[in-house]
Image: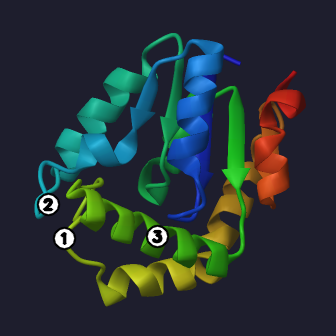
């Protein structure tokens, strides 16, 4: 496992798991949100994002955390392992709200727009399984040459080190 994708609904724990794996496996960690967001209100253009992504994909070793369905197929081609955190939407919403409150209390921002939680974003998370899950399942169905782990519970995520060895 030298090139790992960690995908899942916002709030599923992608960044937390990716950070643990990067440390344990000594891999460079790339958060797609950190590439995409310039500041709280602006993102890179598609072309700029694609250029940055290609630079990452050309490296020999990495963990990439994030969805960005538009570029999923390119990342799947480059990856050798995919970890999909396929968790319930209620848990994801809870974690997003918890992260927002914690960031406000600590006066620390997160990726993207940390100053508010937008209704459109919460709707996106609430509907993620309906809108994005079929796309992910379809994309993964064409990856018979990849190691694919679909984790559906916190218990499975906590045991990831055992699963990966």
Say whether residue 11 is left or right of residue 117.
right
Residue holding disc 3: 98
Instruction: Determine the CA span between mark 1 and mark 2.
Output: 8 Å
Reading the chain from its start, which is encountered first: label 1 or label 2? 2
Q: Nearer the viewer, residue 121 or 99?
A: 99
Residue 57 rendering spot, x and y as whole percentages: 44, 25
Residue holding disc 1: 115
Reading the chain from its start, which is encountered first: label 2 or label 3? 2
Q: Nearer the viewer, mark 3 or mark 1?
A: 3
* Viewport quadrant of the C terminus: top right
Q: Secondary structure at mark 3?
A: helix
Q: Are marks 1 and 2 in contact (CB under 8 Å)?
A: yes
Q: Nearer the viewer, mark 1 or mark 2?
A: 1
Q: Secondary structure at mark 1?
A: loop
Residue 68 rendering spot, x and y as whole percentages: 43, 55
Residue holding disc 2: 40
């Amino acid at each position: 496992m030298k090139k790992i994708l960690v995908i899942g609904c916002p709030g599923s724990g992608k960044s937390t798991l990716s950070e643990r794996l990067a440390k344990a496996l000594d891999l460079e960690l790339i958060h797609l949100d950190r590439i995409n967001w310039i500041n709280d209100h602006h993102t890179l253009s598609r072309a700029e994002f694609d250029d940055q992504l290609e630079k990452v994909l050309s490296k020999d070793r990495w963990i990439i955390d994030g969805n960005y369905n538009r570029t999923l197929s390119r990342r799947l081609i480059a990856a050798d392992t995919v970890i999909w955190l396929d968790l319930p939407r209620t848990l994801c919403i809870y974690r997003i709200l918890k992260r927002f409150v914690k960031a406000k209390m600590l006066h620390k921002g997160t990726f993207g727009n940390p100053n508010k939680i937008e209704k459109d974003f919460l709707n996106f998370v609430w509907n993620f399984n309906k809108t994005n899950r079929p796309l992910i399942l379809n994309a993964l169905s064409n990856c018979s040459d990849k190691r694919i782990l679909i984790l559906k519970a916190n218990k499975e995520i906590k045991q990831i080190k055992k699963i990966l060895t």
